[in-house]
Image (spheres, rainbow, N blue to C red):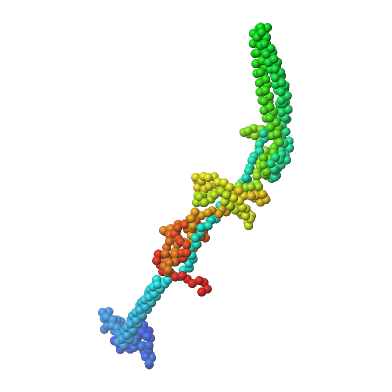
Amino acid sequence: MNQITTPPGPDGAEPKQSAMAGTEVAAVGGATRAGGGRVAADAVPTRREAAPGHGPGALAPDEPERARVDPALDRRRGRLALMLGVAAVLLVGALVALGAWSHSRTSASAAQALQQQNDAVPQVRVAAVKVLDGPRRIELPGNMQAFDAATLYARSTGYVAKRNVDIGSRVHAGDVLAVIASPDVDQQYAQAQLAQTAAAYAQASANQKLAGITSQRTADLVQHGWSSRQQGDTDKSSLEASNAGVGVAKANIEAQAAEVRRLKQLVEFERITAPFDGVITTRDVDVGSLVVANSQSGTQLFSIARSDVLRVQVYVPQEDYFSLHDGEDAMVSVPELPGREFHGKVARNAGTLQAGTRTLLTEVDVDNRDGALAAGLYGIVHLDVPRVAPVALVPSEAVIFSKDGLNAAVFDNGVLRLHKLDVLADDGAQVEVQAGLKAGEQLILNPPVLASEGMKVAVAAPDGK
């Protein structure tokens, strides 16, 4: 703490040193003299003298405060400030220079890399264009149906007296499937015999013969005057009536014969037989069931299907309509029977494309004598369709998709050429192109992202070389 010295008072007393609040001044550097004891020279004390007539320690109210500063300290402070300023300027300059150097170096590296990239020639892999002119295999979903199928109805009213088959039974043409008991039809057939009408015809024939003889005799007698003309006309009319009676009897015989044949057919309908070889697919009656013979609401008895040959129906797209013909070979596969192939032929087609789908209904006949397949199965039909014109086969990795459509990059003596493709078919792995490429051209596989017309490229060396 610095002390303030006051002058001696009027009574000649020794000056006092008193601590004044608020008059402390911090020492700069905190150094003391070598002898110690007094405040260091760099301390800044403030001295105030009392005005005349005032007591010890009093300050003159109108005398300004004067401070004393050491000149050496001020010079040291100036030099220090100057040194700090120069150091700061040098540091800022060094940082600016370092940043400019780093930016220049980065820009130069980027420009060099860009130039190298522009000057670099991309390495590409190539493959020769393959042209196909042989048949094209297409695969279409198909639905298997029985070659023949029929539903059997009752043609004779009665009760089922006997049933010989059930669902899944394999039958041959003519086998009796069921027997219907129809007593009414049997009785009608028994009564509708030709004996009565045959007897009536014989009687009419006898009357005709007698009437003919009588008419001839009467005519002779009338001619000689031994009988009247009236009698002759009567006998002649009797002969004509007898002739007509014979005709009626003959017609009755024919009508009765037709009725007998009808009833006989109804009696035969009591035996339900298989119309062709096949398998029973549905059974709708059992023993004792009442069946009604009616053309509109007759009773359904059985359904039968022929499955030794199956019709596989497929819908061929329009693009293959002009290439597919009846008699061509076909192969059918079933997903549930891996490794098995069922061969057949294109048997028939509808001849007209469906308006909604632009497809042609086609049937392939498949031999199924071993019974491995069944009607209603789903299968895949493999058809070898002749090509109308040769096509180029392009791997999908060589196709370029852009706003201009589909293109392919072709290697032409170190230069990339873009060819527009006219795609015919695409199976995901390969693309069939009908225009845009020629046989032997070198396709660029996985072309550069920024591929452009006239770009310089080089063929990469094969792996391992």
Is residue 182 shown left or right of residue 76?
Answer: right
How many numbered discs, if any?
0
Q: Give percent across and percent down for residue 165.
A: 71, 42
Q: Is residue 162 placed above or below 111 in the rendered structure?
A: above
Task: Determine the image quadrant of residue 216.
Answer: top right
Q: In the figure, residue 23 lies in which quadrant? A: bottom left
Instruction: List x then y, in percent, for residue 118.
Output: 39, 71
Seen at 28% across and 83% down, the residue is 66
Q: Between residue 245 and residue 432, name the one nearer to us.
A: 245
Q: Between 118 and 406, which is closer to the camera in this rendering?
A: 406
| In the image: residue 191, left or right of residue 375 | right
The residue sitting at the front extreme is: 224
Residue 408 visible in the snapshot: yes
Relative to the observer, which residue lies in front, 365 or 194? 194
* Residue 23 visible: no
Q: Position of residue 283 (x, y in %)?
A: 68, 41
Q: Nearer the viewer, residue 268 or 119?
A: 268
Q: Is residue 238 above or below residue 95?
A: above
The residue positioned 53% from the left and 47% from the top of the image is: 360
Quarter of the rendering occupied by the N terminus: bottom left
Q: Is residue 46 above or below residue 260?
A: below
Residue plotted at (65% across, 46% down): 307
Answer with left or right where residue 185 lies relative to residue 460: right
**In the image, what residue occupies the spot 45% across and 61% down?**
437
Residue 27, horizontal then vertical, whole percent: 36, 84
Tell me where residue 36 sits by quadrant: bottom left
